[in-house]
Amino acid sequence: MDRDLHDRVPLPAVGSAMATVTPESPDTGHTPDEHASDGGQMAEHAQSTGKQNHAHPTDWLYVKVAIALGLLTAFEVFTYFESLHGWGDTAIIIMLILMMLVKFFLVVAFFMHLKFDSPIFWRLFVFGLILAMAVYMVMLTAFRIW
């Protein structure tokens, strides 16, 4: 088992009881529990090594994102039914693609936590999205769906 995976991962011990692993920190030689009442020493160590905790979204934020996704989906379904309005195919396709992009960014940013991760991951996802959209647009044009 990787010693850096989790601080207190239960491991099977000899017999029926479970042993708990508390690895020593490679740079200080202290276990994580020794820093619990150190008066901020752990936070100073995190700042000196560049490892900082970031804010995580609240449950209410997830609920708001889910409501927004539900409303966007309802509007997509409404837009799809062309018989309700006299818009052209091109307008409907563009509206559906724009709503798809907004939903994609909401899911990726919040539910996949890319908003709270390193910017390189966000850039990779945006590059992948641009590439996928370019291929999709080429296919729409090739099959004359516009």
Image (cartoon, helix red, strand yellow):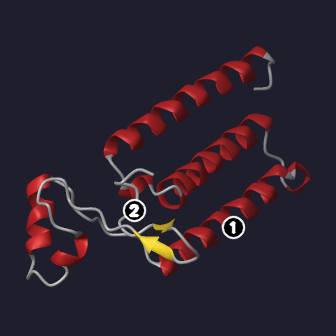
Instruction: Say what secondary structure mark 2 lies in.
Output: loop
Kindly indicate whether the residue at mark 1 contacts the one at mark 2 (C-beta within 8 angstroms): no
What type is the residue that disc 2 sits on?
Answer: His
Query: Label 1, on which residue?
Result: 70
Q: Nearer the viewer, mark 2 or mark 1?
A: 2
What type is the residue that disc 1 sits on?
Answer: Gly
In the picture, measured across the screen, residue 76 lies left or right of residue 35, that is right
Instruction: Look at the picture and state if 11 lies above or below 63.
Output: above
Q: Earlier in the sequence, mark 2 or mark 1?
A: 2
Q: Position of residue 9 (x, y in %)?
A: 44, 67
Instruction: Look at the picture and state if 93 lies above or below 26.
Output: above
Q: Nearer the viewer, residue 31 or 130?
A: 31
Residue sitting at x 55%, y 68%: 65
User: In the image as oriented, which residue stretches furthest toward the right?
Assistant: 83
In the picture, measured across the screen, residue 47 lies left or right of residue 96, that is left
- Callout 1: few (<14), some (14-19), or many (20+) C-alpha neighbours within 10 Å? few
Q: Position of residue 133 (x, y in %)?
A: 60, 30
Residue sitting at x 69%, y 67%: 70
User: In the image as oriented, which residue stretches furthest toward the front?
Assistant: 15
Residue sitting at x 63%, y 50%: 99
**Residue 20: image tag:** none
Q: Position of residue 32 (x, y in %)?
A: 24, 71
Instruction: Look at the picture and state if 27 lies above or below 58.
Output: above
In the picture, measured across the screen, residue 133 lies left or right of residue 115, that is right
Q: Report, in whole angstroms, how far the alpha carbon at label 2 lies from the one at label 1.
A: 36 Å
Instruction: Say what secondary structure mark 1 lies in.
Output: helix
Query: Label 2, on which residue?
Result: 6
Which quadrant of the rendered structure holds the C terminus? top right
Residue sitting at x 39%, y 70%: 8
